[in-house]
Amino acid sequence: MNKLLEMIEKRNQAWNAAKSFVEQRADKDGLLSDADAKTYAEMEQKVRNLSVEIERLQAMEAMDAEMAKPIGTPITAKPMNGVADDKPAGTFRASADYKNAMLNALRTNFRQVSNVLQEGIDAQGGYLVPEEYDSRLIDALTEENVIRKLGTRITTSGEHKINIAATKPAAAWIEEGGALSFGDATFDQIILDAHKLHVAIKVTEELLYDNAFKLEDYILEAFTKALANAEEDAFINGTGVGQPLGILAETGGAEIGVTSETAQPTADEVISLVYSLKRPYRKNAVFLTNDKCLAYLRTLKDLTGQYLWQPSLKEGEPDRFLGYGIYTSPYFPVPQPGKACVAFGDFSYYNIGDRGTRSFAELKELFAGNGMIGFVAKERVDGKLVLPEAIKLLKVAED
């Protein structure tokens, strides 16, 4: 039995015994003898002693419950010492107070948690990243993640449905007074859901307590790079099961435009890839490949001996190949038989659905034995190519 419940039961029994003693020993005037009064006083004191012990155990349980709360549960004390905050609801994550409270909580292993963080609690526990931090994460992801740069980003609050015209009506010539023919227009839906992506790190307690170290920059940089790398890999190679559906997925991914006849595509085959893409998509099209294939593409020449590669003439713009921008990703497969080595198309048709905001959480007690503290960042994201025909692939010939 729980010790607190056991003590409460003992107190109840002691109190009932004391009342029963008075009822049995009182004379016709309701009075106790000196000896009985002394015995009752001892019984009453026992009840009082049990009450003191029960209050102590209740205080201990309340403290245990407070310490065991997830970091997403606000501290109910008054850390602001009664000073009211006149900021309207909904503005806290953008405030300097919220940023400072988050940084202070991180540096003190969440031992000093301000009630200002209550405004930023996510549904699964943890504190939402302050708006400035969240923006910096998005900026860094855009810089690191080439698909985020080229694709279309959508912020979703739930399952997001994208309507796609599967077939279109066709016009037909008819004779004067002839009967009309009706074609069926059909529509499909692409659903952007939300797959959970997380990254965890651990740092020493000494590092957390060292205010001279830029803890904020270190954690943001580490989380940003890890999230960006995992996202870009999934946006290109994802299976759609527990992760986004990648551009190279056999079903739902980009279409094969050209298959090379040898292990190394020729200039003519790359040109054929460009014109395998429908003209409306070509005006915003770019190439995507890996560094190894890029090094090979840079050596290709036209019939006059001129390189097909054109270096960028303006800072911030990509180099060009056959007049189109060209990007690389370390997660795009290297040339190998039966696999795509170059993608060409309008990557804005790859839709990225960001569900909600990212959040930090502390991994309590996990590394307590070796003086380390763990932190985890989480996000929910999905990605799909809504029109497979918008991107064409150059596939290397089979052996």
Image (cartoon, rainbow, N blue to C red):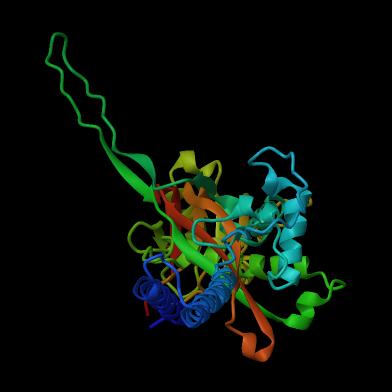
Residue projecting furthest to the right:
212
Q: Position of residue 323 (x, y in %)?
A: 63, 49
Residue projecting furthest to the bottom:
370
Q: Nearer the viewer, residue 144 or 278?
A: 144
Q: Position of residue 51 (x, y in %)?
A: 53, 73
Residue 66 relative to residue 107: left or right = left
Q: Nearer the viewer, residue 144 or 307?
A: 144
Q: Is residue 224 visible?
A: yes
Vertical placement of residue 123 versus 178, above or below: below
Q: Nearer the viewer, residue 24 or 94?
A: 24
Q: Nearer the viewer, residue 43 or 225?
A: 43
Q: Is residue 319 visible?
A: no
Vertical placement of residue 37 versus 286, above or below: below
Residue projecting furthest to the front:
28
Name the residue at 42% across, 47% down.
Answer: 158
Name the residue at 59% across, 81% down.
Answer: 365
Name the residue at 74% across, 55% down.
Answer: 99
Q: Position of residue 335 (x, y in %)?
A: 50, 74
Vertical placement of residue 249 versus 368, above or below: above
Name the residue at 71% across, 68% down.
Answer: 106
Vertical placement of residue 213 versus 314, above or below: below
- Quarter of the rendering containing residue 330: bottom right
Instruction: Count every numbered label the image shows and give the total.
Output: 0
Residue 309 relative to residue 35: left or right = right
Q: Position of residue 311 (x, y in %)?
A: 73, 57
- Quarter of the rendering containing residue 8: bottom left
Is the N terminus in the top left, top right, bottom left or bottom right quadrant? Answer: bottom left
Is the C terminus in the top left, top right, bottom left or bottom right quadrant? Answer: bottom left
